[in-house]
Image (cartoon, rainbow, N blue to C red):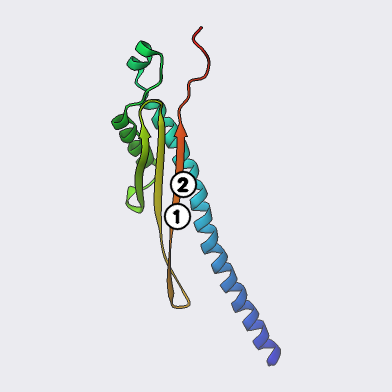
Amino acid sequence: MKESYWGYWLITLGVFIIIIMMLISNVTTKNTQDYYLIKEVTEASMVDAVNYGYYREYGELKIDREKFIESFFRRFSENVSLNTYKIEFYGLYEAPPKVSVKVTSNSGSFIVAGDQTTFDIVNKVDAILELSGTNE
């Protein structure tokens, strides 16, 4: 009988460890996906927001701030629900084009052994749009 209790405790411990690993895996996978999504959306939105009239006249890149923000929200909301994210723009410069985006995701709360724990993951992306090549 004593050996069967050890078997029950071993199975219970295994199930508990699997549950903890699934929770941690879910948070880290979501973080990686969010980072690459933010990076790709920021890059595409900066290209969408290039002011081509200014570029033709002065030969320098310049982005339109409002167009960038609109494009970023449109592209980001096509992939995720905006209800679980808080998006902040800081360091947004039109010329030379530089953007800093901070996205905070609410991954929910977990109750483990009576303690409620929340994970708010913050991703920060700084992007600079450069012109490659020369006009000679």
Q: Secondary structure at mark 1?
A: strand
Q: Residue furthest top?
A: 136
Q: Looking at the picture, does residue 28 appear above or below residue 93? A: below
Residue 97 showing in the rendered view: yes
Residue 78 showing in the rendered view: no
Q: Residues within 10 Å of mark 2 (few under 14, many from 20)?
A: some
Residue drawn at the location 49% of the way across and 51% of the way down = 31
Q: Nearer the viewer, residue 21 or 129?
A: 129
Q: Residue furthest bottom?
A: 1
Q: Position of residue 37 (x, y in %)?
A: 46, 41
Q: Position of residue 1 (x, y in %)?
A: 68, 93
Please state if 49 lies on the left or on the right of 113 as rendered: left
Front disc: 1 or 2: 1
Residue drawn at the location 51% of the way across and 63% of the way down = 23
> How many labels sit on residues?
2
Residue drawn at the location 41% of the way across and 32% of the way down = 98
Query: Which residue is labeled 2 in the image?
Result: 34
Q: Which mark is residue 121?
A: 1
* Three-letter code for the amino acid on which mark 1 is drawn: Ile
Q: Secondary structure at mark 2?
A: helix
Q: Nearer the viewer, residue 95 or 112?
A: 95
Q: Nearer the viewer, residue 98 or 76?
A: 98
The reply to whether dot 1 and dot 2 touch (C-beta < 8 Å) is: yes
Q: Give the spatial CA distance, label 1 vs label 2.
A: 10 Å
* Three-letter code for the amino acid on which mark 2 is drawn: Asp
Q: Residues within 10 Å of mark 1 (few under 14, many from 20)?
A: some
Residue drawn at the location 40% of the way across and 47% of the way down = 103
Q: Position of residue 111 (x, y in %)?
A: 44, 72
Q: Position of residue 41 (x, y in %)?
A: 42, 36
Q: Earlier in the sequence, mark 1 or mark 2?
A: 2
